[in-house]
Each structure stands twice: as structure tokens, then as C-alpha cells.
Amino acid sequence: MLSLPTAPTPYTSLKSTEKDVQTASHEWMIPAAESGCLVLADISGYTQYLRDTELEHAQDVLADLMETVVGGLRPALRISKLEGDAVFAYALVAEIEASMLLDTIDGTYFGFRSRLRDIRQATTCDCNACRLIPNLNLKFVAHNGRFVRNVVAGNEELTGGDVIVAHRLLKNNVKDRLGYLGYALFTESCVTALGLDPLILGMGEHRESYEDVGEILSYVEDLEAAWNHEQERRRVFVLPTEAQLEFVAEFPAPVNVVWDFSTSPRKRLLWQTDFTHIDQTNPGGRRGPGTTNHCVHGRGAITEEILDWHPFHYYTHRIVLPMVGPWVQTFEFRPLGEEATELRIRIQRLRGKQRLLWPLMRPSLAKGMRDNADRLRQILKEQAAQPVRLQTE
């Protein structure tokens, strides 16, 4: 059974006494409209699966898969509510960047497909509920718009025309027109707000028309193709046995939060204070293989190029230092429960001139890593201590 946190109420309850009525207008606040990204994750084939399988077994499988989806979406996204076979989530406009949203969606889909595979391989049961597991898939709808957050019977409810648009898009013709089974549909307003280039990212253009909300232009990512590519692509990963140095640190935050602070240029500047600014070049507006960072510190600059990118698990980049040259680093993220993360940074074994310089470089490099980790740890502690409130002004 999923247990979701109850959102705090934005209202101060009104009393029936004359004195309280006089002051009620000062205490009661109407929630303001806000902007953000609305995301729906929907398990495809759910209805047919229930119809063709034993209900008791089917419910266990679906509950497990819903846990996987919810776990993948948060805390990057706020979970609004569960809607049968779907999860409705959102992020306010200032809370999420394009790369983090795409990584979250891809990571959730990959986690879902991995869980499907694991459940099927781990069971010896030949009932329909287990046999038909491969027929399930996962689709996403992401739409940017305005909405109001209310509290109804102790639960947060999002209302507004854009909430309706997002839900309408769950009923679409993507499978018939594009042939995609697992996919993410991004509306034009979403890709515009996030600064994405859908064509460079390989998304297909798609239009849907509804009687009540009109025609909607969208772009669709084939997540099943991305999953297959993920299984086949070459890894660039520094193993412990290949490392010149391995630095280990623990942080009091979920793995995707630590990932975000480690990969977002804006958030890196909060704790990597030796850099004055970081200029990032992304293919199509999304971080991944081919992304370059130009990190300026004082009069010098460091160039980073991402070689391998596996969201929330690891990434590897080639770093070029002035007077030293290039080396390869892997950043590996390991969840320690739901609210803590271990980060391991490994520098590939050096050669030639770099190896000769290493005894001089190692002390300052290790100290810089420790200092940066301490600053990030403090930021994450302060962030965790801040309560989440609904905007009411």
C-alpha cells in the first residue's frame, strides 16, 4: 500500500463567532495560480491485464510496479496523487531543469522495465498475471502550464485548464500513428519552457485534437528504443581496480537530488566555490554524452566532456586541466536507503607526465574534494530542514 504525505493546508479555518468573522478576511488567503510542469505516468495495458488475469496476483504485481514508478519520479517531482493505473506529479517552474526532467522520466522508465524483467525472471508461477507481465508498458505526458493548488479533505488537488489538457493527452493516437508502446509525450509548451530542441533529441512530431481543448502540438520520445539502446551501448566506467584515486562521501539526500546538485551548472556553483562560472553546451538542450562544461576558476579554466551518462547511477567525463592534460573520472551514485546517498569519484590511473606530477597534485585535489563535499552536505541538510508549503500569496 502506498503512503503519500499529506500536503499542508493553505487555509486558516473560519470560525462562526462574530469576533472571528471580523478577522477572517485577514486570516483566509486564496491560493494563487502557479506555473510548472505537469507529468502523468500511466501503465499501458492495465485494463486488459486486469481483464485477462487472476485479480489477486495482478494487484500484487501492479502495486509493485506503481511503487517503482512513484519512487522514480520523486523527489525531482512532487507526487500529487495516484489515479488508478497512473501517477500525477508536478514541479513548480523554478524547481526543475530540462535535463533533470528528462533524466527523471528516462530513469523511471528504465526502472520500470528492469522491474518487469526482474519480476518475470524471479517467478516460477505460470498464472496469467505472471505470464502476461511483458504486455505491460509505461507512457508519460509532460505539459507546462498554470494551475492552482487546493487542499480538499486533507489532500492536495491541482485544478485549472492545463491540468485538464495534461489528462486529455493520456488518450492519444501515438501508438497507432508512430508505433511507440513506451513513450514520453512533451507538449509544445513544455519543450518551449524547458528550452529543448526536440528534433536534435530525436523526438517525433505529433498532433492531437480534442473537442474541448482543441489541437495540441507535441513531441514524442520513443522510450522503448532508448531502453534497448541503453542495454547495448558501450560503457565508459572507471572501476576501483583502474583508479588512481577514489574519493567517497555520503550525503543526507536521495540519490536523484545529489545527482542534480552534481550535474547542474547552477547548483554546482553553490558548493564548488573554486569555480566562478560554468558554461555548458548541451546537444538539444539536454545533458548527456557530448555535453561540454567550460569551468572558470580565477585566471584558469577546466574543460569537461561527458563520455557516458547513466542517470542516477553514474556518469563519466574527460577533464582537461591546464598544464596537466586530460584524464577520465567516473562519478558513481549509490542509494543508502531513501534519504541518503554515497558518491564515489574515481580518477582513472594516470600515465606519463601526469603520473610524475601526481604526488604534487594529490594533496590539494583531495582537500578540494573534501571541502566541496562538506559544503554540499551542509546545503543538503539546510534544504531538508525547510518545510514544503503551498503558495498562498
Image: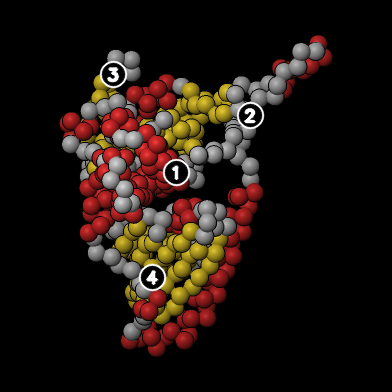
Question: Would you name the residue on which mark 1 appears?
Answer: 67
Give the amino acid at mark 2: Thr
Q: Residue furthest right?
A: 19
Q: Residue at x 53, y 67 (%)?
A: 249
Q: CA distance from mark 1 to mark 3?
A: 32 Å
> Mark 2, mark 1: which one is toward the viewer?
1
Q: Earlier in the sequence, mark 4 or mark 3?
A: 3
Residue 215 point in image, percent of width and height:
27, 21
Give the amino acid at mark 1: Glu
Q: CA distance from mark 4 to mark 2?
A: 46 Å
Q: Are marks 4 and 2 in contact (CB under 8 Å)?
A: no
Q: Are marks 3 and 2 in contact (CB under 8 Å)?
A: no
Q: CA distance from mark 4 to mark 3?
A: 49 Å
Give above or below for 359 relative to 58.
below
Pointer 4 local density, CA inside 10 Å: few below 14, some 14–19, many at least 20: many
Q: CA distance from mark 4 to mark 1?
A: 33 Å
Q: Earlier in the sequence, mark 3 or mark 2?
A: 2
Give above or below for 240 relative to 295.
below
> Mark 4, mark 2: which one is toward the viewer?
2
Question: Would you name the residue on which mark 2 appears?
Answer: 9
Q: Is residue 203 left or right of residue 21?
A: left
Pointer 2 local density, CA inside 10 Å: few below 14, some 14–19, many at least 20: some
Q: CA distance from mark 2 to mark 1?
A: 26 Å
Q: Residue at x 26, y 27 (%)?
A: 172
Question: Would you name the residue on which mark 3 appears?
Answer: 210
Residue 329 numbered mark, or none? 4
Q: Secondary structure at mark 4?
A: strand
Q: CA distance from mark 3 to mark 2?
A: 34 Å
